[in-house]
Amino acid sequence: MIEKKINHVAIIMDGNGRWAKSKGLLRLEGHRKGVENVRKVVDKARELGIRYITLYAFSAENWDRPQSEVTGLMTLLKTFLKSERKNLVKKQVRLLTIGDTSKLPEGAKKELIKTKDATAGFTNHNLILALNYGARQELEFAVKKIAEKVLDHKIVLNDIDYSIIKQELYTQDIPDPELVIRTSGEHRLSNFLLLQTAYSEFYFTPIFWPEFNENEFEKAIDSYKGRERRFGKTGDQIQKAIIKE
């Protein structure tokens, strides 16, 4: 049976800068408002029984933005980690990351480690921040790790399949998302979880991230529940499996 229960939602939080511009504010104010919105959506996901929420917080390409904006984003990240630590512990939400976090500023890395350590014992609810993340970079990293294992005779070439590749991805212990949400009206993945979203459903909304509240999140979940996920099968096959179950 193909379950309608949703376990993992991934979100491309887009439109902070455009929201700020529409309000006559600096771009950084849009990012600040977007950070404030994170808690609302994470709390709603927890309420709905969704165990994993992945947020595309900072891409590998975002380093190319103006230095002042990058510095501001890193400061916001540090502040978020410090301010949300107690809340995550209180609500028993584990913080995880995907991406190359070694390149983050030392202050942000320090707070990241503290928050991950403080929440490491929780497993029922998980907040995953994609930081300095890019799907192509993730694949490059995985290919190199697999090549090393081949050279070290730990695996042979014919053993390589997707299960081997998955073991070397940042998301090796995280289930693939059933649903990907992108705010702000854009309709692309922007180098986000390209392998993991092969069979995900997508929900695009014109609403900018700072205004994507709990009700809008629930609309996205309801949209997902109304869809039929076939995984290459026919609709009749899926219905027969449901009836049989």
Image (tube, rainbow, N blue to C red):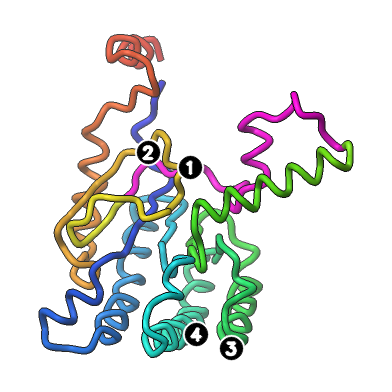
Residue that badge 3 annotates: 107
Task: Name the residue carrying label 1.
Answer: 196
Q: Front-most of 11 and 238?
A: 11
- Residue at image location 75% in from the left, 43% down from the top: 147
Decide: is 52 above or below 143: below
- Report whether 85 appears left or right of 209: right
The three-letter amino acid code for the residue at tag 1 is: Gln
N-term mark: 3 or 4 = 4
Residue beneath label 4, please?
78
Q: Is mark 2 on a helix, strand or loop?
A: loop
Distance between the Cα atoms at labels 1 and 4? Answer: 28 Å
Q: Where is residue 45 in the image (x, y as percent from the top left)?
A: 35, 56
Residue type, mark 3 in image = Gly
- Residue highlighted by disc 2: 200
Type of residue at label 2? Ser
Closer to the chain start, of discs 2 and 4, is: 4
Disc 4 is placed on an element classified as: helix
